[in-house]
Amino acid sequence: MSGYRPRTNSEWGFLGAIVGQAVCATALDIAVLWKYFSWVTPLVYQVQQSYSIPVNCGLIIFGLCYQSVLTVDALHTRNNVQMYNICVFNALLLTFIAMSYGQTAEVISGLSTSRALGDQPLVDLSVDLWASVRLLLLTLSVVVAIATLGLFFYGYKLHNEFAWAIYRHVRGSRQMRQWFLMYKVLVVFIKVELYFFIGFLLLYGLVNVHFEVPEFPLIVCLLLSELVQIALALYFTKTENTLGAIIAIAFRLAQIAYLVSRIVVLCGNGIRANTILKNEMLLFAGSALAFNAFICINSVLCITNFGCGLKPLLSGEISNERQPYEFHSLGYQPANQSFVSRRLSLD
């Protein structure tokens, strides 16, 4: 993948939209962060609201960088499924950025009126932060919106170019290609779900839970278990280990139960429901929940395909890659090869 270079105008357009968006949006977010950190005082970190703007900007920058890596991988492998998910990823990221616009104004207003002990202000009251970052946030939303439209446009054009990729990679029956596609869909869903689950845990843990024991240590454990769970799921599926794959699904179901419980808590009347960035938390939790449900369904379908001959291909024991316009010998050997050789020499 390190030597990848776009091969068509559509690939250049898709990659250009992602890279251009990442560069512009990251620069805008860094500018917002710089103005924010110049505005606040060390006393501001006594309140939970102070974490919302840095966490929002951090998640946006991380999402843009992570999406760029997924895009290069999708274009290099000509993965249609991953390309579609990148478009959905970007649309969800745009929704998050649009939500952050209103929440940023609310946070700035709340911090401006808050006071520490001794009636000390938490921020520099001589600076109107909202007036200086409002245009930056609007520009950020416009940039990501334009990039999202470009991704869907070039994604539609790339569909025809990539549609044959799985047939080029997998020889055999149509059923074999469908089994291979199920595995590829599983891998793509896991890649995208990782961002939204980690994003929810960061928002919920830093802004809502705010280091409270025992829930915050549980969130840290969930972050680590997510990485272990992904490694186990991919390994057991590639090696067609039925028991291991079932255990991985059980972990996914536990994660789904946790997400459902947090959504219920956020939508309830308790103390956790009265929090800043509530809508953003619900967006990330709902997205992670949906992708987890798809992962469980696809994992079950993959288990039903164990023992059907896909394991050698997934484990790399055989390579079915065929290069376009490449001629191969049919392996035909004439019965009287010595005679043919002598005749060619005489000629």
Image (cartoon, rainbow, N blue to C red):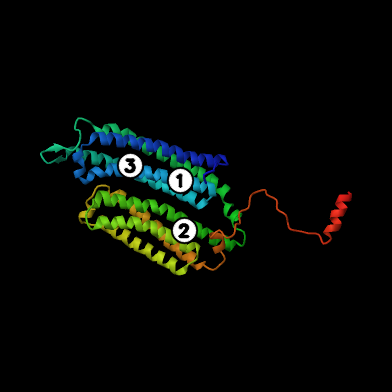
Q: Position of residue 203 (x, y in %)?
A: 29, 49
In the displayed orientation, state which residue is furthest to the left. Answer: 118
Q: Position of residue 54 (x, y in %)?
A: 29, 42
Q: Judge from the rendering whether residue 27 lies leftward or rightward of residue 154; answer left or right.
A: left
Image mark count: 3
| Spatial separation of the CA atoms under disc 2 and disc 1 | 18 Å
Q: Nearer the viewer, residue 220 or 193?
A: 220
Q: Amino acid at mark 1?
A: Val
User: Sequence-wise, which precedes: disc 2 or disc 3?
Assistant: 3
| Spatial separation of the CA atoms under disc 3 and disc 1 | 19 Å
Secondary structure at numbered mark 2: helix
Q: Which residue is mark 3?
A: 57
Q: Nearer the viewer, mark 2 or mark 1?
A: 1
Q: Position of residue 297 (x, y in %)?
A: 44, 63
Residue 286, numbered circle: none
Secondary structure at numbered mark 3: helix
Residue 186, numbered circle: 2
Q: Amino acid at mark 2?
A: Leu
Q: Which residue is mark 1?
A: 69
